């Protein structure tokens, strides 16, 4: 058995995998946050609650209706996205003309309501969700649970597909153009308000999808998104919200850094992302991939 | 003259609290090139934006192709067949040239094809993979005009297409506008450059203090030149 | 009715309050009123919305509680220590946060306060999940003020609150406060006039952090404990809510807002998560319909009323 820097490789690679998984969630959440902010000018504080709702939707569908994980993976994000459509149409739409801070406060209030209601109904303790692909394979230097490997690959594919859709397709061109100048895009005949609704629904659906992916790894609980969204804010500050690829790289990168910190000095693993944020603010205030506006 | 394609009557428009247009009346016939002339701040651009439906608040009547458009959102107006080229050109920095060209959706059949647009503006073909805002001012203007030809809109609103451009490019844009008229496009043009407008337009409306105060036909320009100089302060 | 007469009425009410209402409730309200005043200094007069003020409040509560309980410091020194630590934390986080503006500023302060939360969760002196319990109320100023007595402590808290409230009032109306307002209105112009906007913002941030710390330290003495609740993002949200309810950028708004929320929590204490839900609803309603807050709306109505009656 060899050791790397005095750390057994099983622990090192295990944490690295966990870091990649966390990074995948950071990437998926910060991606949605950035796309929503670009078009709606709202920092969606409800993002963590919507991630939680995705996990809950899967858990409830399994428990009450016997709907398996693979179906939930499609259904749960759609359900949560529809809820997002409702929020956007009824509430968010009224504050686009105001300072960004009001959107932040409004969605913060919504997050409190959603999380409060879930806590009231299901308590704050975690509910287990059965692993849909149990087992794993011993790679020699580490043990790889199938499901965890699958999550990393799946989320990477989702992130890259999102990048492709936004940067390389016609629909993505509409989104990029509307982010720059919604008035003109609308004057070209595109229904921008509907696009805004769909963009919000997409970002929210992405958060919910991350929630479903997380359900078998973490426990499903009303508070599972509360702290996550705060870390994702730091991720967004570090990456800057200008670039889709930037969000993906930053998300995965920070997850890995966090995982490595857990190996090297466990007590610092919770705060390392915030320390990185402080350093980035010192060196490049606009964020690693940010454009100074 | 038959029923005009665009008929604007008693148009008022506001930006926030300020009352910019105070009763604008004019009409544009099918296939015509009509200019709005006037000094800076007279309300020409605001008139164009009102027709497009992108000012704060409008009142009055704007009938396009038999359809009342006041109170309708700008995407509806665009789908009626009006296309808009803003003064600041509005080229999207996050889109390349071709993406910029392909952005406005087709609203009616019979638009100019992309190949024809590239034939009209060969520079755009060469640079179609470049970022939109990396083009020169003249190329950006061509891109801004080119991209609204594809949509099948019958009426083009052009806001100062010659502003800040070299004479040779101004000339090129003039030729293009003449070709567009020959293809049957109707053009409503806002211009500061009267010499340029005079070579193109069938009629000129004079805008002052948020109202249309006079109309001069192309044939009468020579005769009215003193009056025009007075209006435009040149 | 001017704000001066309104102030005197409030002061008179505060002086007789402990004979009518439960003193610990009143003291809690005063601590939060001071906390909200400190927050309001930043958002109302510099235009910076910190979403991480709990880090100053909670950190100072821990420091003050620890100094009294473990080191046996007299309360007055422990209070100062709490405020000083909060101020120092304000220097570090503020210097970084003011490098960005608007919504980013809010996210950065929130992220830093989350970092402080995790620090407090793991640091040995905070008691982790249990918090710091049983902070004794030792007499103040060498026994001159026996604050074991709730009524005595109430007047001490009131005096400290008035000091903080007065400090905010003085800051806003000083030349320094005028520069802050100029920066809020138009930062570029203030810079071109030769003001170092970043330095002004930082000083305001540190003052706000210090006062928030004073409030937190005071709370530790009043409630006799400091827990993780004081450093959570929810606490940061609570102070935002108090300021919003009262009316951002108004002098008395923070006091009214704190009173409303503390009263509400007092009545809903038994029903845990509903406090969150109701707070969330209040956020939504205020952002959608009453952005000026209670004091702001009343002031507007009053102004409209007086101008109408002076016309007729």
Image (cartoon, rainbow, N blue to C red):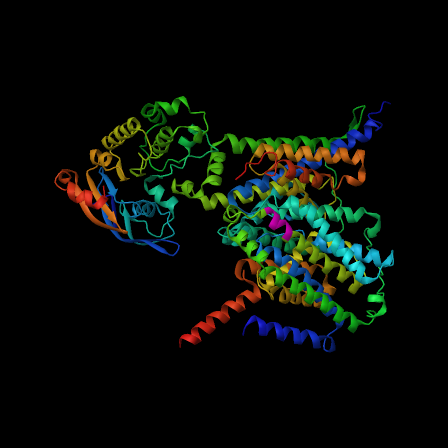
Tell me, yes or no, whether the highlighted magenta stretch contains residue C103: no
Q: How many marks?
A: 0
Q: Which residues are magenta?
A: C198-203
Say left or right for A194 vs C228.
Answer: left
Decide: is B221 above or below A96. above
The answer to which quarter of the image holds residue C142 is bottom right
- Placement of the N terminus of chain A among the 4 image quadrants: top right
Nearest to the observer: residue B164 or residue C117? B164
Decide: is A204 above or below C62. above
Residue at horizontal 40%, vertical 21%? B126
Residue A71: image location, x then y, percent = 64, 39
Residue B135: image location, x then y, percent = 41, 28
Residue at horizontal 53%, vertical 58%? C288
Residue C10: image location, x then y, percent = 64, 73
Say left or right for A45 vs B172.
Answer: right
Q: What secondary structure is the stretch in magenta mostly built from?
A: helix
The answer to which quarter of the image holds residue A203 is top right
Residue at horizontal 33%, vertical 39%? B83
Say left or right for C197 vs C261.
Answer: left
């Amino acid at each position: 058995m060899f050791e790397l820097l005095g750390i057994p490789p099983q622990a090192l690679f295990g944490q690295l995998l966990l870091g990649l998984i966390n990074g995948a969630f950071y990437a998926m959440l910060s991606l949605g946050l950035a796309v929503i902010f670009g078009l709606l000018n709202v920092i969606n504080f409800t993002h963590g609650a919507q991630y939680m709702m995705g996990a809950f939707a899967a858990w409830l569908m399994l428990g009450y209706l016997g709907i398996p994980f693979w179906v939930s993976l499609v259904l749960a994000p759609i359900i949560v996205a529809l809820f997002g459509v409702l929020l956007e149409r009824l509430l968010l739409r009224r504050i686009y003309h105001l300072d960004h801070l009001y959107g932040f406060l409004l969605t913060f209030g919504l997050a409190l309501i959603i999380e409060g209601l879930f806590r009231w109904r299901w308590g704050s303790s975690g509910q287990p969700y059965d692993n849909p692909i149990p087992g794993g394979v011993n790679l020699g230097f580490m043990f790889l649970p199938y499901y965890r490997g699958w999550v990393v690959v799946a989320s990477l594919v989702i992130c890259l597909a999102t990048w492709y859709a936004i940067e390389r397709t016609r629909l993505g061109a509409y989104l990029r153009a509307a982010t720059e100048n919604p008035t003109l895009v609308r004057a070209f005949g595109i229904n921008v308000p509907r696009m805004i609704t769909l963009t919000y629904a997409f970002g929210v659906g992405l958060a919910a999808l991350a929630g479903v992916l997380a359900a078998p790894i973490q426990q499903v609980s009303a508070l599972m998104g509360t702290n996550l969204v705060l870390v994702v804010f730091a991720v967004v500050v570090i990456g800057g919200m200008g670039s889709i690829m930037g969000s993906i790289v930053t998300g995965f990168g920070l997850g890995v850094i966090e995982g490595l910190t857990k190996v090297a000095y466990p007590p610092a693993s919770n705060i390392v992302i915030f320390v990185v944020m402080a350093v980035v603010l010192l060196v490049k205030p606009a964020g690693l991939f940010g454009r100074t506006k | 003259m038959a029923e005009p394609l665009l008929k604007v009557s008693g148009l008022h428009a506001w930006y926030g609290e300020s009352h910019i247009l105070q009763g604008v009346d004019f009409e544009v016939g099918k296939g015509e090139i009509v200019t709005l002339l006037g000094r800076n701040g007279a309300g020409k651009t605001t008139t164009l934006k009102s027709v497009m439906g992108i000012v704060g608040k409008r009142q009055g009547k704007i009938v396009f192709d038999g359809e009342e458009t006041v109170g309708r959102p700008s995407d509806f107006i665009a789908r009626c067949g009006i296309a808009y080229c803003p003064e600041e050109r509005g080229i999207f920095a996050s889109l390349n040239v071709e993406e910029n060209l392909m952005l406005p959706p087709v609203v009616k059949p019979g638009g100019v094809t992309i190949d024809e647009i590239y034939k009209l503006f060969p520079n755009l073909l060469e640079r179609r993979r470049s970022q939109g805002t990396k083009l020169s001012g003249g190329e950006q203007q061509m891109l801004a005009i080119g991209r609204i030809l594809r949509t099948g809109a019958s009426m083009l609103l052009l806001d100062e297409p010659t502003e800040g451009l070299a004479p040779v490019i101004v000339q090129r844009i003039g030729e293009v506008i003449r070709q567009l008229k020959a293809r049957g496009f109707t053009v409503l043009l806002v211009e500061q450059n009267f010499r340029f407008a005079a070579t193109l337009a069938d009629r000129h409306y004079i805008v002052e203090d948020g109202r249309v105060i006079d109309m001069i036909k192309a044939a009468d320009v020579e005769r009215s030149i003193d009056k025009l100089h007075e209006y435009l302060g040149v | 009715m001017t704000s001066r007469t309104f102030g005197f009425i409030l002061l008179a009410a505060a002086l007789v309050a402990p004979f009518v209402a439960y003193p610990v409730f009143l003291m809690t309200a005063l601590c939060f009123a001071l906390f909200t005043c400190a927050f309001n200094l930043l958002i109302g007069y510099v235009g910076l919305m910190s979403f991480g003020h709990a880090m100053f409040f909670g950190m100072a509560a821990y420091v003050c509680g620890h100094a009294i309980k473990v080191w046996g410091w007299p309360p007055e020194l422990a209070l100062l220590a709490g405020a000083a630590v909060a101020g120092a934390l304000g220097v570090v986080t503020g210097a970084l946060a003011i490098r960005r503006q608007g919504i980013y500023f809010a996210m950065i302060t929130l992220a830093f306060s989350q970092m402080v939360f995790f620090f407090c969760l793991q640091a040995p002196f905070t008691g982790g999940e249990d918090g710091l319990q049983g902070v004794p109320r030792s007499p103040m100023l060498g026994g001159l003020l026996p604050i074991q007595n709730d009524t005595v402590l109430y007047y001490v808290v009131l005096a400290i609150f008035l000091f903080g409230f007065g400090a905010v009032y003085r800051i806003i109306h000083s030349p320094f406060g005028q520069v802050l307002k100029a920066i809020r209105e138009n930062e570029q112009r203030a810079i071109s006039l030769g003001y170092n906007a970043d330095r002004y913002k930082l000083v305001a941030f540190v003052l706000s952090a210090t006062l928030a710390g004073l409030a937190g330290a005071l709370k530790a003495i009043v409630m006799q404990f400091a827990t993780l609740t004081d450093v959570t993002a929810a606490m940061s949200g609570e102070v935002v809510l108090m300021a919003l309810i009262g009316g951002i950028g108004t002098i008395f708004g923070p006091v009214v807002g704190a009173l409303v929320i503390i009263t509400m929590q007092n009545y809903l204490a038994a029903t845990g998560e509903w406090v969150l839900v109701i707070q969330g609803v209040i956020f939504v309603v205020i952002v959608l319909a009453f952005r000026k807050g209670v004091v702001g709306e009343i002031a507007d109505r009053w102004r409209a009323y007086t101008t109408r009656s002076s016309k007729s």
